[in-house]
Image (cartoon, coloured by chain):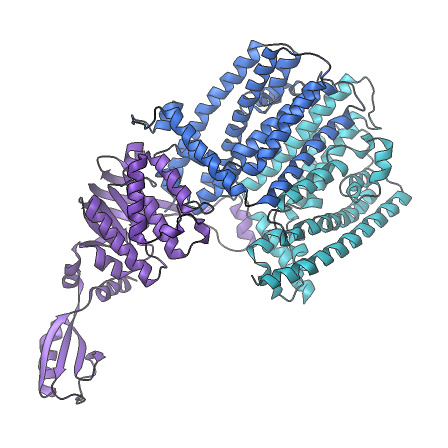
Amino acid sequence: MIHVQNLRKEFTVHQKPPGLLASMKSLFVRDTITKVAVKDVSFHVDKGEILGLIGANGAGKTTIVKMLSGIIHPTSGSIDVLGFNPWQRQHNFCKQIALIMGQKAQLWWDLPAADGFLLLREIYQVPPKEHQEMLDFMLDMLDVRDEVNIQIRRLSLGERMKMELIAALLHKPQVVYLDEPTIGLDLSAQRAIRKFILEYRDTVQPAMILTSHYMEDIERLCKRVVILLNGQFVYDGPLQDVVKQFSTHKIITVKMHTPGNIPQLDPKIELLEDNGDELKFKVKTEEVGAVSQHLLANICGADLSVGEVNTADVIETIFSDSI
Amino acid sequence: MIPRLFFKIVNLELRKGMSYRVDFWVNAIVSFFAAMGVMYFLWDSIFTASAQGRIGGYTLEEMILYYVLVILIAKLVRGPNQMVGIADDIYKGSLTKYQLFPTPYLVFKYAEHLGSLLPAIIQLVIFGILSPLIFKFPDAMTITPITILTCINVVMLANLLFFALSLPLQLVAFWADNVWSLIVMNHFISGLLGGAMLPLELFPDWAVSLLAYTPFAYLYHFPVRILTGHIGHQQLWMGIGVMSCWILLLAACSWLIWKAGNKRYTGVGI
Amino acid sequence: MLLAHLEGGEQEIYRGGNLMVRYIMLYLYFLRFSFSRAMEFRLDFFFRIVMDTVYYAVHIIFFGVIYRHTAMVGGWDFDQMLIFICGFFLVDAIHMTVHANNMWMLPEHVNTGNLDYYLIRPVSSLFFLSHRDFAANSFVNLIIAASMLTWAFLRYPGEFSTGQILVFLLLLVNGAYLYWIIHMCFVIPVFWTHSAHGFQMLFYSLKQFAERPDPIFRGMLRRGLTTILPFLLIASFPARTLFEGFNAGILLHAGGVSLLLTLFLLWFWNRALRSYSSASS
């Protein structure tokens, strides 16, 4: 449903040095530099799939999402969403997509959500009956029926985000972009929203793209992820394979038969956890063999197993290594 | 301590004024020529239609000179930010931030106000030089170094008077949500009664003598007439006296409103 | 072309009939929300009434003082001037009520990126952004301005035919439309400058030209003010159809300029969106 080929986006930024003299100069001329936000990215998303877009701040996630919704014009490359070129913003395209940005509200601040929903019904030309069914379903699902007549600005952050989700999905979009939908929310609200997104996916079978800072969002929602580093993809594939491809370390777990008896070990071996009778070590992949032998030799009476590092940690290392 | 901070604030505002770039200059040029254009064509047609050489004591040339001066001086007296400032601080709750400052808030605000005047001064100089080339001014020039010096002093006083006049209105923000309409009203009324729209001599005599006791007549009309040498010694001192009385009165008034408002503000605990 | 713009360049099927109906329905929602929200700010309501009354009074006094010294301004006597200026008040009140708030907010939408949500809707973004916020608080001013115009007509010593008055009102509505287009053209540069208000201050300085009778302006300035920046077509041309008798030339002139400026606005708006979409991140 979404096909992206060699997508690229550059933009120019003005620079203004501090100081009175520089200010005077900027009255007449300004210096500009070109920044490449997205470098030749290609991918596709199928019906019913939720693609996780992972990247540090400024990696270009939002830029990609905005290009896919037609807000930003790409510098080069091609986008095909439902057979449309988003940039033309044809009304038949707009009617089938939804964009949710956790950082920006789309519902009108000074109106109750119910009024906003009505306006959106009119905008998207949803037949009243269909609209009401969808609305009822979502209000119950997210448990915000009682808040629907309260002005948005008087709602809590979590309630507001739930209303935003409803607002975005009322017209049953076939393509949904979720840009940090859970940002700043408490755990129970995050959970409710995740559950809701999955439910929507199951009933409508849209193509979805999710960006999030919370690895839990990604882990729960996305089977496939792409990792974006400085505007480029460094990975595109199943979430569980991220570890295989990127992990430089493995976890060795030692279960001791006699607790409390920790021997003197090579200080280069990093001890991750110490649960009394269970020790976890983080070890470079190529040193696993040597370290295992070392451990077995030094700890009497223990079971030893080798496992993978957890995904969130791997992804964090990818980002921190790039800085 | 306070004077140094005062000038620091003035300096900061000066810099802000410079950073507007194109918008600012286009705005300055167009607004000056639009205002002048409207007035020029209006009076030109009136003078042509009426066979008299003088209206309200002004020849066409004197009238045009009056408008050039009043437009430029009004900018100095009002400053550029009459819409925002104090009222905004009150709404947005940034007043609390200032309460931690050692400088009294209103002194701080006045420093900001003065600092924002630089663009107006530059405009005064530039358009002051350009105008005689574009418009026909009276042959007998009555502007002298002495009238210029007197005018500068009176403009400073008028600026303070305008600040004092708009202060109580801005402070209404403690109680009401939308003060900008009051500020706009003040702009219109002081514009008409202060001589920015018409020389006050055109008003009926009873109105002229009444206006002499209001603060308005001293905002724009008075400085301009001083500059063109139409105000005698006695009138000058009288005028300065009235201005000072109004400034003190308005300051006292503002102080009371400020006290009451501040109590309410901190009471709410924003 | 206007229709094509509103339709987003392709055929769509509309529930409940045609495109016009759809936009009118949308506008009714805007109205409804604006009124329900306005009830919350009663003091503002009151302030606005006082403010606009002061604005009207200041202008009438201004002309009152001038007419103490002359019998005619631009060929109009005081009674005629009163009809003209009250006509302008009506246009201004329409603008303040229907468009001005939206114009004022647009730069903020552009600068904060809130425009994003308006762009992805299957509705003309130009329509949406210009009409979303109906200033219900100014609605009373609309009534005041209309009453003042009625008053100016009633006290006028001469007579007008019904046809003349209808043409006058039609041209005033066209004047309000032109007023919006011109204002919009001064706001749109914000897409490039990213300043807080675009060139709106400029618009408000130039608007003074609309507050004076057009016969006083001559030469190049007059030509400019009746074509590129048609401030003189807003209230002064309509008033002339009353005082000079029906004149098809004025009607054609106003219609032609409105059409051309509409096309220009659409072009300008599309350029602006293009720039927005290539600059923002």
Give the color of chain A as drawn.
purple
Viewed as shown, does residue B115 lie left or right of A293? right
Q: Nearer the viewer, residue B70 or A50?
A: A50
Residue A247 falls in image quadrant: bottom left
Quarter of the figure that contains the N terminus of chain A: top left
Viewed as shown, does residue B190 lie left or right of C13? right
In the rendered image, residue A322, in percent from the top left (x then y), is placed at 27, 61
Which residue is rendered at x = 49% and y = 44% of the image? A29
Above or below for B229 versus A151: above
Which residue is rendered at x = 37% and y = 25% of the image? C19
In the rendered image, residue C41, in percent from the top left (x then y), is placed at 57, 45
Q: Which chain is in blue here? A: C
**Residue that protrudes farthest toward the right in the picture:** B234
- Is residue A306 something one can see in this rendering? yes
Residue C164 falls in image quadrant: top right
Q: Which chain is in cyan here? A: B
Q: Nearer the viewer, residue C115 or C133?
A: C133
In the rendered image, residue C275, in percent from the top left (x then y), is placed at 39, 38
Viewed as shown, does residue C219 lie left or right of A185? right
Viewed as shown, does residue A261 lie left or right of B182? left
